Amino acid sequence: MSDQVQAAVVDDYIPPGPFREFWSYFCGNRGALIGFIIIVTVLLAALFANFLTPHSPYEQYRDYILTPPAWQDGGLWRFPLGTDEVGRDVLTRLIFGGRLSLFIGMMVVSLSLLLGTFFGLVSGYARGMTDTLIMRAVDIIMALPSLLLALAIVTILGPGLINASIAIAITYLPHYVRITRASVIAETSKDYVIASRVSGAGVLRLIFITILPNCMAPLIVQASLGFSNAILDAAALGFIGLGAQPPSPEWGSMLANALEFIQRAWWVVTFPGLMILITVLAFNLMGDGLRDALDPKMKL
Amino acid sequence: MFSFLLKRIGVVIPTFIGVTLLTFSLIRLIPGDPVELMAGERGVDPIRHAELLAQMGLDQPLLIQYWHYLTGIFQGDLGTSIVTREPVMREFFTLFPATLELSFCAIIIAVSIGLPAGIIAAVRRGKMTDYTVMGLSLTGYSMPIFWWGILLILLFSVGLGWTPVSGRISAMFWVDEVTGFMVIDAFLSGEEGALISALRHLILPSIVLATIPLAVIARMTRSSMLEVLREDYVQVARAKGLSMPLVVCIHALRNALIPVITVIGLQVGVLMAGAILTETIFSWPGVGKWMLDSIYRRDYPSVQGGILLISCIVIFVNLTVDILYGVVNPRIRHNR
């Protein structure tokens, strides 16, 4: 009798799939879950910005310049977070700014992830001279503080959102190259790779199909943290006038424009910065959670 | 030890050459040649243009130009600023003490708060204190410091009137430059109130610049401390009946500090990047603000020289930290 019960229990037990296991770890981390929810909210707001707000981010209500937020004296519910120095709705601009920030994050991460992984794979697989050359280049990029290098590149390319993203992507390349290279070197000597090579797999198949999937975990973590760095750096570039150019509603450049009114209108300065902080914090929380879920060994 | 030193220095040389290549190409990749840039909107006639190019050695092959650039660097010649006509090297080193003072103060704040905070979080792991410290440090790590600086100015300078908004010392004082560090110079000047004024100017920018390093140091200290606390020798010390504070401070801290020292060294790059933003917000007359102003003024020789010098400083500090690391931790010295 008891044998049967035992057997039935064992039969019913299905080990959780890799995704399910990851998800249960991820949800166990409350911070990561909060981060994830914030990111999804910002993402949805950015996607449906046109339906969420009746105003355009560029429309200037000249009769309502520097209206305070709705809950303050003189505030209007028409402009919940007030208006800026030319009468544009701050909330609308913040929502549309989310679009730009997420776009920059996406662009920077995909650029540096693609290029970085490529160079890392080549460097780790080929070794020798190629490896040395790539790693020296990486050392050079790493010797420069990221914002300084980004400034230098923007000086060459000229200010603007796209150029700023390219500049930031280049400054974050080294992380991806190093991570990929390290895991490629660790994986290449393992039996399954040797087995695959012995059975006649070509170089491309070895690199992209056999080795690469096993290097993904640290790369995913780095990409998630890369998002936050990209958003922060892009905002800094926007703030010093070398990133997104006015009148685009990028959070950093909104802050820069509002500086003159800092004493008269606290809301034009406070909210864009708060949005940067919340979004960056959300990505960092999620990155930490991903790191714990994907690789328990890698913790800061 | 000697071979370890040589190896470390050997790795740095290609990096240094790479950085010079980068700064060398920077000025040549910008649209328009230096003569046109100097002439600005006035323009310059073709004959004079060619003359000036030849005078500056810009008509020679790139390789020879690079050689001249490189030998110039070793003789301390980084060109002259287009705007002020001053040698870039001199401009940089007149402003550098201000940045150094700010960074030094910031790193003191970051270490003196970050280190204890990380230790406390590790010791009280999983408790409210741990969550608070970690939450705060992640917030600090995510902070757009340019906004943080503005908020602090709004609160302490505009709202409460405790600190001045910008500069290094009140205009009431005329302090002779002795060391270049305003706080020390103000102290040496003996003028009443000068030291207080210098400190009040220094405090807000230092806090802003310290924010990110502080967060990084606290996080690193916590995780490194947690690792060490798990070790057998710590358990033995506890089993012998030593109190927890004693075990942490005497036994664990020494080993926990090793990775933290590296991280503190790595913060130099962060500080230099942060200085650009912090100095701009607080009108602090250091190299960060000067770099940015040079970019706005299209003063490319200054930008070029500034980037080169700042990266050299970062490379040098990282090398020193690397070597120190080998001195502190013999395992590293012999492994590589």
Image: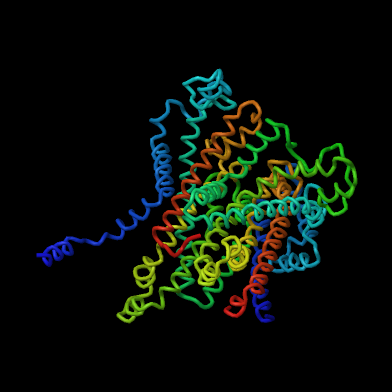
Q: Nearer the viewer, residue B127 or A194?
A: B127
Q: Quadrant of the N terminus of chain A?
A: bottom left
Q: Is residue B125 left or right of residue B168?
A: left
Indicate the position of residue B231 as horizontal and vertical percent values.
Answer: 51, 70
Residue A140 showing in the rendered view: no
Badge count: 0
Direction front: furthest residue: B241
Q: Residue at x 57, y 45 (%)?
A: B143
Q: Residue at x 58, y 44 (%)?
A: B144
Indicate the position of residue A57 as horizontal and vertical percent values.
Answer: 49, 30
Q: Is residue A34 left or right of residue B223?
A: left
Residue B325 showing in the rendered view: yes
Indicate the position of residue B280 as horizontal and vertical percent values.
Answer: 69, 43
Q: How is the image coloured?
A: rainbow
Q: Nearer the viewer, residue B271 or B232?
A: B232
Indicate the position of residue B40 as horizontal and vertical percent values.
Answer: 74, 45
Quarter occupied by residue B191 = top right
Q: Nearer the viewer, residue A157 or B141?
A: B141
Q: Residue at x 53, y 52 (%)?
A: A166
Quarter occupied by residue B68 = bottom right
Relative vertical location of residue B196 with respect to residue A178 in this rendering, above or below: above
Q: Nearer the viewer, residue A203 or B330?
A: B330
Direction left: furthest residue: A1
